[in-house]
Structure formats: C-alpha cells, structure tokens
Amino acid sequence: MALLIGCKKIKTAVFISGNGSNLKALIKFSKLKKSPISINLIISNNAKSKGLNYSSIYKIKKKIFDFENKNLAEKKILRELKKEKINLICLAGFMKILSEKFIKNFKGKILNIHPSLLPKFKGLNTHRRAIKNKEIYSGCTVHFVNSKLDSGKIILQKKVKILKNETPKSLSKKILVQEHKLYPKAIIKIFRH
Ligand code: GAR
C-alpha cells in the first residue's frame, strides 16, 4: 500500500548550485506520507556542489550540466526531465537563470525559493542589501517561476526580524532555517486540492 501511494507522488527534480541544504529539507519532506512529491532527480550546473552528496546518501539520480552553452544545457536537461517523467521542478539555490523557452516547457511547474521578502531584493546579495537598506524585516519567499527574474506568483513568505548588529552571515543562517520549513509548506499549499 505504501508503495502504491509512493507511485502516485509527483515526480520532482531539484536544481541546485551549492550546499543543497534546501535540497536536503525537500528530500526529508518527500519521504513523509503527507508529501505530494517524490524527489527523483537532482540537477546541478556545478560539479562541485556540496549538495550533490545527497545523491548517494539518499540514492537519488544526479546529473550535472555545463551552462557554458546554456542553450545546449537546457536542451539536455529537458531530455533528461522527459526521460525521468518529471512533473515538477524545485529550484533550490540554483544560481543560473533559465531561459523563457525552457520555462515555457514547464509552465506553472517550476518553483523557486528566494532569500528575501519579494518583491523586495530580487537577485543577488539579498541579505547585505536588506541590512544596508535598514529594513526591520527580511525573510524568504517561495514563488512560481516565470520569465522575469524572481517575479512569479508568490505562494508563501516567512518574515524574519533583522536585529541590531545583524550581519549578512547571521541573517542568512536565520533565514535558511525558515526556508527549510517554508518550501515544504508551499508545496503542500499548491497541491492541497
Ligand atoms: C538559499 O538561501 C536560497 O534561498 C538561495 O541560495 C541559498 C541556497 O542554499 N537562492 C537564491 O539566492 C536564488 N536566487 P542551499 O544550497 O543550502 O539550499
């Protein structure tokens, strides 16, 4: 029975570039009965991503694609996603911008987590910019991916207070803890019905 339920889960690929702490949180979540997704593929643009280690730890297929030639990389990725019958993509610290063409192929089926309260601080160096801007709060956002950077429909956000003497490093640490909870919650929210 458990196996049968497992089969019905939405086959998901997680795209990473670095540490993969969000990937780990998503894998742990995917193993819960209440999870609507299974993680079937890990994709990275960076062979040195620490997060790729979760492939052997959790026995999940991994593939690395060189984005030097983005067009070719995306074509190969699409082929792989088809082969594995992937139905959902979770970007989790994936630091490459996907083309409009790629996104169209997975319309409404790509999610991203971003370490700010969007629409504030799209792009890079979010924590440094939030502190410099003297924001009282920052946080994280899970959103659908569209062709404009960090601009798709917001699914869920979590606020985090910026304390006096906060550094980009301390803020990043606090926000990451929240990211690990927010991504699974956002996935539950979109597949609730
Ligand atoms: C996370 O904070 C994620 O929100 C951010 O990179 C970090 C990856 O950490 N993503 C972006 O900045 C995307 N623009 P992780 O590799 O430990 O999950």
Image (spheres, grey):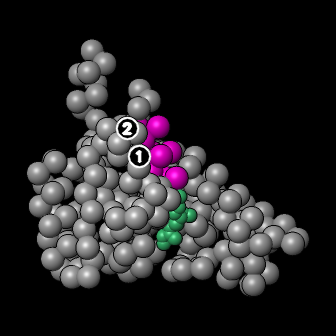
- Which numbered circle lies on residue 116? none
Q: Position of residue 13 (x, y in %)?
A: 30, 52
Mark 1 sits near ligand 1, with its Cβ under 8 Å away: no
SS state under label 1? helix
Residue 111 position within the rendered picture, expressed as x and y whole percent measured from the top left: 39, 60
| Position of residue 146 in the picture relative to residue 61 (left or right) | right
Q: Three-letter amino acid code at disc 2? A: Tyr
Going 20% across and 73% down the picture, which residue do you hit? Answer: 73
Let me know if residue 158 is in the magenta part: no
Q: Would residue 163 be visible to someone looking at this image?
A: yes
Q: Which part of the image, by quadrant, shows the N terminus?
A: top left
Secondary structure found at label 2 = helix
Disc 1 residue crowd, few under 14, some 14–19, many 20+, Cα 10 Å: some
Q: Which residue is mark 2?
A: 58
Tell me which segment is drawn in magenta: 21-30
Write the residue at 60% across / 79% down. 125
Q: Amino acid at mark 1?
A: Tyr
Q: Quadrant of the C terminus?
A: top left
- State whether label 2 is within 8 Å of ligand 1: no
**Badge 2 density bin: few <14, some 14–19, many ≥20, Cα 10 Å:** few
The residue shown at (41%, 26%) is 33
Give the CA distance from mark 1 to mark 2: 6 Å
Mark 1, residue position: 54
In the depicted view, which residue is nearer to us: 30 or 100? 30
Marks 1 and 2 close (CB-CB < 8 Å): yes
Question: Going by the picture, which residue comes out furthest to the right?
Answer: 164
Helix, strand or loop: magenta stretch: helix
